[in-house]
Image: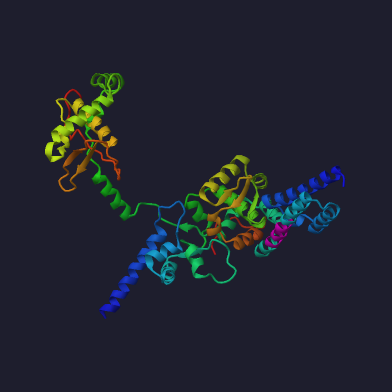
Amino acid sequence: MDEEKGETERAGRKLAIAASMLLFSSHRLPGVRGWELRRRLGRNYLKIIDALNSKLNSIGLRVKIMFDQPLGGSPAEEDFDRARFFVTLSEPLSVADIVAAGWNIEDVAVLAAALSYLFTKGGRASEKELVELIEVKLPRWKVEAAIERFIRKGYLTRAEDNTIKVGWRALAEVDEKELLKAIMDISPTQQKDGSEGRT
Amino acid sequence: MSYGKKVVSREELERIMALCESIERRGLDPFSVNVKELLARLRRILEEQKDLDTIVLDAETLYRIAVLISLQQKWLKERASSLFIDSQLVSLKIASADPRQLAAALARSWRPIVRAEQITPYRLRQGMEYFLMLPPRDRALEKLPLTREGLQITHQIGYAKGVELEEEIKKMHEACIRMAGSKGEVDYWSLVSAETFEGVVWRAYVLSFLVTEGLADIRKNPITGELKVVPYPSKKKREKITALVVSIKGGEVPKGLG
């Protein structure tokens, strides 16, 4: 009986460690690598992450695993070791939520346009092309400033040949297919009620 | 084979390579190039000229074309994964949508990372421990005379000008050996003590050179914190070098500086 209680306590402690590792980080990049989790939680860290994921799901969060490279088949243990683990929201936000969180709606629109265009261009396009595309909607200075801001935040990356690429953060947070589908669903007569984002 | 023709072939190969490179670098549509035609040109050049330079350049061009073909494969895969949505189509949609609609489209696909950037209790404890370990700062030091007055003091006690440091080190070394006597060590504070604060600073300063030179060593008792200077008759090569910070004020306001 005591043994069982001790086992439960140990598991609970490991869950708490996993949660703190994933949520509290002092690195520039959020989340932790699989090998870091294995070092702290032991060989069965994936089971602990799975258990944590179930707990987080109940409060609208989930553990996301981002592999270094797209995998063909099912990931091997080494793939998990190299992968980055972090916590994201499990459900998308509404526009109203995004605005309430302090984001400027026009900045978010720039990001949406830039990402959707980049996704269809194989993840990379020239900065000039991108700015010219978006400046039909917003003033050029605003577009350029927003792009700079998103580069700093990691949603976009500037390559040395003045091309803009999809950044690590966009890959981690944005569902490419879902975004393209949403862009295709836009119709000029669409209701502008700010609650379209809720699914 | 004429030299002129060779130059033309070379230029043609270089042009093909530049074209392939620019498509790769700029992420342009790899299907915008007719690979079959490029390969036919390559074959013609190789048949016309079989000198080593052209063969090497030809091989390099062939590699570039192979990369282009792999890009075509990648492009197809990406197009398939993006539901065959063309960039032109996306551009049209972007042009016809208003910013709020675009934002709503992103909101549908966006699940932001959740993380806390505030300090953790562990880091807070670490910071507290570090803070407690810091030696107290003497506020009187902040009242030290600045620039001209400060320079006057340093000049008076001769920190820099007109002082033969080597001579001072020699004197300190002799004093150190004399005071250490048969015990072989002398208390740090009795060695650096002087009538004035400036004098103490000066002696400690000279002693630091003595230690750096390898003519003496300072040993600290980790329990009592006692500092002992062990003089050596001749320079000794030190195997392990560590920095030791000694606060010579000890919290007292020296005369003339307060």
Where in the figure is residue B97, as x and y percent of width and height? 65, 52
What color scheme is it?
A: rainbow
Q: Is residue B66 magenta?
A: yes
Q: Is residue B52 above or below residue A51?
A: above
Q: Residue furthest bottom?
A: A1
The image quadrant where one finds the C terminus of chain B is: top left
Q: Residue A171 sits in which quadrant?
A: bottom right
Chief secondary structure of the magenta portion: helix
Q: Is residue B258 visible?
A: no
Segment colored magenta: B65-74
Q: Residue B75 sits in which quadrant?
A: bottom right
Q: Is residue A10 magenta?
A: no
Where in the figure is residue A19, as x and y percent of width and height? 39, 63
Instruction: State the residue at coordinates (72%, 54%).
Output: B64
Instruction: State the residue at coordinates (45%, 51%).
Output: A28
Q: Is residue B145 visible?
A: yes
Please tell me which residue lies in front, A44 or B176. B176
